[in-house]
Image: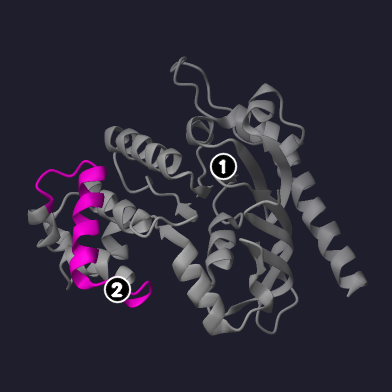
């Protein structure tokens, strides 16, 4: 059986520039599996998620490769057909719940409009589904929350609303873009457990964008390590934590704080490792330009 999502040799660049921001990215995800995209800030993790969902910034274009979702090559589809497929099949859990929600609208339409406008549900059915999802994400008094504005909710409750919205239409794929970054540690654990439970219950394929290898160990089955828009290692989570193959991956793992040993010294990524990873990126660019 083929993978539910396949990204093959994907490159993206700024309009009018030869410099790529994504470099020949390839990976696949089966139904029900979670792939972690890890790496430092600016590595291209969120950019990959946006490319999959068709929401790249207007200044960036895909210049090479394919994204195959549920057997259909998105890059070969008409824009309207692509939006329709993604709207019916995929969903996003964004990073910052305060900016992701419209501050001038109550919570109810922010969950139900997608069901009504894209999937053709009646408003009554969409409202019932929204209440079910708010219960499912463990929100007390969902009726009150449905009538609230985002600023009237806590950060954890806003993130629960976004998770409910993402899973409302039973998507086959969810892109979670660092969904716990804006939350305190206690709430982070609750939200991660909630996402993991919903993902397993619905057998949803998931791309989980994070810089936290501790999160990867709890949520993901596989991971891809990025540097400079290039994947330097694809691995199962078990194999990665038993011994990463790439020097940059080993340095990232070594730099991860060890909560079982709070007195241990932090080990920053060595400059020589960064220089070697950057050299790989430059070599890949030279090869790409030569091939073009």
Camera-side residue of 189 and 32: 32
Q: Residues within 10 Å of mark 2 (few under 14, many from 20)?
A: some
- Total marks shown come to 2
Mark 1 and mark 2: Cα distance apart in space: 28 Å
Q: Which residue is mark 2?
A: 116
Q: What is the chief secondary structure element of the magenta stretch?
A: helix
Q: Residues within 10 Å of mark 1 (few under 14, many from 20)?
A: many
As displayed, is residue 263 above or below residue 105?
above
Q: Is residue 165 left or right of residue 29?
A: left
Which of marks 2 and 1 precedes in the sequence? 1
Mark 2 lies on a secondary structure that is helix
As displayed, is residue 279 above or below residue 217?
below
Q: Is residue 91 visible?
A: yes
Q: Is residue 144 left or right of residue 196?
A: left
Q: State the extent of the magenta-drawn residues as a range.
A: 116-142
Position in image of residue 251 (x %, y %): 67, 33
Mark 1 lies on a secondary structure that is loop
Q: Which residue is mark 1?
A: 33
Position in image of residue 131 (x %, y %): 18, 54
């Amino acid at each position: 059986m083929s993978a539910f999502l396949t990204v093959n040799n994907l490159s993206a660049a700024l309009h009018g520039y030869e410099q790529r921001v994504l470099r020949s990215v390839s990976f696949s995800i089966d139904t029900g599996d979670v792939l972690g995209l890890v790496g430092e800030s600016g590595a291209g993790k969120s950019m990959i998620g946006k490319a999959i969902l068709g929401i790249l910034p207007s200044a960036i274009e895909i210049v090479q490769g394919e994204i195959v979702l549920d057997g259909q090559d998105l890059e070969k589809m008409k824009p309207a057909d692509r939006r329709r497929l993604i709207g019916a099949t995929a969903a996003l859990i964004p990073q910052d719940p305060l900016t992701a929600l419209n501050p001038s609208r109550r919570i109810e339409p922010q969950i139900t409009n997608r069901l009504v406008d894209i999937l053709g549900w009646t408003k009554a059915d969409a409202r019932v589904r929204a209440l079910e999802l708010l219960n499912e994400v463990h929100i007390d008094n969902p009726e009150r929350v449905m009538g609230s504005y985002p600023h009237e909710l806590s950060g954890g409750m806003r993130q629960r609303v976004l998770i409910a919205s993402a899973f409302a239409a039973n998507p086959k794929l969810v892109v979670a873009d660092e969904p716990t970054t804006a939350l305190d540690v206690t709430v982070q654990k609750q939200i991660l457990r909630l996402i993991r439970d919903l993902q397993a219950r619905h057998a949803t394929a998931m791309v989980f964008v994070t810089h936290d290898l501790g999160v990867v160990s709890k949520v993901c089955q596989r991971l891809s390590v990025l540097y400079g828009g290039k994947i330097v290692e694809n691995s199962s989570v078990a194999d990665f934590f038993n011994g990463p193959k790439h020097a940059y991956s080993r340095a990232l793992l070594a730099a991860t704080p060890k909560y079982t040993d709070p007195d241990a010294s932090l080990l920053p990524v060595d400059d020589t490792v960064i220089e070697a990873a950057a050299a790989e990126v430059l070599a890949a660019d030279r090869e790409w330009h030569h091939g073009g």
